[in-house]
């Protein structure tokens, strides 16, 4: 059974198309108009081994906020759709990723209950190109709300803003990959004592 999600989201501010295949090979085609964000979504697809297509046309003449937020919302919804009934998956995943002087620790539970814990170093550079670094948390909030997962992201240290953000996306990709993969020992089994996720 294919595990593919496809979401189209259109508002007065943005038009977003997201397609994701959880059992892909990391083929990525992303264009949001925000260069650094494209780079981060590329990390998500490649390190998660998700085939990912993202096309966003947003009101970049205002700023990047709506484009980034609405893309994250559509991505979360597509991820949830692709997970399907969650039967036979590992459910939990975690990964720690260094990037030079920075370190990110990410743990995920594909629980059906959205919750985010996010910490990163204070006093980061405010911008990376046209990307507002305060948007990283908002991306995660938006993704979690639509994907309906519990996500803990912790960056205990780092200096370079590019590295601090990028290691979060790489660790998130791997944690999502591990959690969403099929467990050969649990075929046909829902990983929950409640009988629902």
Image (spheres, rainbow, N blue to C red):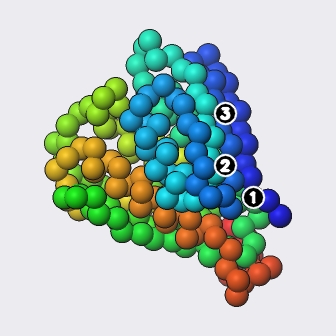
Determine the residue positioned at 36% across, 68% down.
96
Residue 81 can be seen in this image? no
Q: Secondary structure at mark 1?
A: loop
- Disc 1: CA contacts within 10 A as few (<14), some (14-19) or many (>=20): some
Determine the residue positioned at 70% across, 87% down.
185
* Residue 18: image location, x then y, percent: 65, 39
Q: Secondary structure at mark 3?
A: strand
Residue ID for mark 2: 20
Q: Secondary structure at mark 2?
A: strand
Q: Quadrant of residue 195?
A: bottom right
Determine the residue positioned at 20% across, 55% down.
158
The reply, left or right, for residue 1 in relation to residue 173 is right
Determine the residue positioned at 58% across, 59% down.
49
Q: Earlier in the sequence, mark 1 or mark 3?
A: 1
* Residue 50: image location, x then y, percent: 61, 55
Q: Residue furthest bottom?
A: 185
In the picture, the disc for residue 17 is 3
Residue ID for mark 1: 3
Q: Relative to 186, is 82 above or below?
A: above
Instruction: Give the Cα separation between the discs numbered 1 and 3.
Output: 17 Å
- Disc 3: CA contacts within 10 A as few (<14), some (14-19) or many (>=20): some
Instruction: Give the Cα separation between the discs numbered 3 and 2.
Output: 10 Å
Q: Tell which of 132 and 173 is nearer to you.
A: 173
Q: Earlier in the sequence, mark 2 or mark 1?
A: 1
Please identify the quadrant where the N terminus is shown. Answer: bottom right
Instruction: Give the Cα separation between the discs numbered 2 and 1.
Output: 8 Å
Residue 25 can be seen in this image? yes
* Residue 45: image location, x then y, percent: 54, 51
């Amino acid at each position: 059974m294919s595990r593919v999600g496809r979401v189209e989201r259109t508002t007065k501010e943005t038009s977003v198309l997201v397609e994701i295949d959880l059992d892909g090979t990391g083929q990525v085609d992303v264009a949001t108009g925000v260069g650094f964000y494209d780079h981060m979504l590329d990390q998500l697809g490649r390190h998660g081994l998700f085939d990912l297509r993202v096309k966003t046309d947003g009101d970049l003449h205002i700023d990047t906020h709506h484009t980034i937020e609405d893309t994250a919302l559509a991505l979360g919804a597509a991820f949830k759709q692709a997970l399907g009934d969650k039967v036979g998956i590992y459910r939990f995943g975690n990964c720690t990723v260094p990037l030079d002087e920075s370190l990110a620790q990410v743990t995920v539970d594909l629980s059906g209950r959205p919750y985010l814990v996010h910490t990163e170093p204070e006093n980061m550079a405010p911008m990376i190109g046209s990307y507002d670094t305060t948007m990283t948390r908002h991306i995660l909030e938006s993704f979690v709300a639509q994907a309906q997962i519990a996500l803990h992201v912790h960056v205990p240290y780092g200096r370079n803003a590019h590295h601090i953000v990028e290691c979060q996306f790489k660790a998130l990709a791997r944690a999502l990959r591990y959690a969403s993969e099929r467990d050969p020992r649990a075929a046909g089994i829902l990983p929950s004592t409640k009988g629902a996720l």
